[in-house]
Amino acid sequence: MSQPTSVMPPRHLTTPEAARFLSLSTRTLEKHRTYGTGPTYRKIGGRVIYTLVDLEAWTARGARTSTSEITADEVRPAKRHAAISPAYAKSDGGR
């Protein structure tokens, strides 16, 4: 008897697996998580896991068609960033 075809739930990746998927070091992905600049993750007990959908969405934020393209979305480096005030973000950047 064959089993019905069902949709598999999203695969969850550990930090090392997610880092390999993104071609990053494990430490870089950990820094992104610490600074809040990385992909969405889930905490199950003490384990950190990532879904493929979240990893792909994070990388899509960095998609560009030209080096001169200006866009609001970006993938920021894995370091602390100063908070951008809402008024500054809506203006022309203080220019």
Image (cartoon, helix red, strand yellow):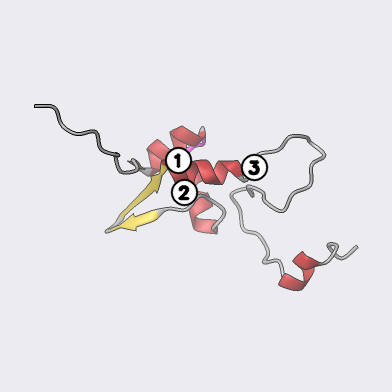
Q: Comparing marks 1 and 3, which lies closer to the viewer?
A: 3
Q: Earlier in the sequence, mark 1 or mark 3?
A: 1
Residue type at mark 3: give it. Gly
Q: Comparing marks 2 and 3, which lies closer to the viewer?
A: 3
Looking at the image, is 3 positioned above or below residue 75? Answer: above
Q: Residue at x 45, y 40 (%)?
A: 26
The residue carrying pointer 1 sits among few (fewer than 14), some (14 to 19) or many (20 or more) residues within 10 Å by Cα, namely: some
Residue to which mark 3 is pinned: 62
Residue 26's label in the rendered image is 1
Query: Magenta stretch: residue 43 in it?
Result: no
Measured as percent of width and height from the top left, residue 11 is found at 33, 40
Q: Is residue 23 left or right of residue 2?
A: right
Q: Is residue 91 left or right of residue 24?
A: right
Residue to which mark 2 is pinned: 30
Part of the protein shown in magenta: 24-28
Q: Are circles 2 and 3 on residues that touch, CB within 8 Å?
A: no
Q: Secondary structure at mark 2?
A: helix
The residue carrying pointer 3 sits among few (fewer than 14), some (14 to 19) or many (20 or more) residues within 10 Å by Cα, namely: few
What is the distance, in whole Å, between disc 1 and disc 3 at their CAs?
Answer: 20 Å
Q: Is residue 6 left or right of residue 36?
A: left
Q: Residue furthest left?
A: 1
Residue type at mark 2: give it. Glu
Q: Residue at x 72, y 53 (%)?
A: 72
Q: Are circles 1 and 2 on residues that touch, CB within 8 Å?
A: yes
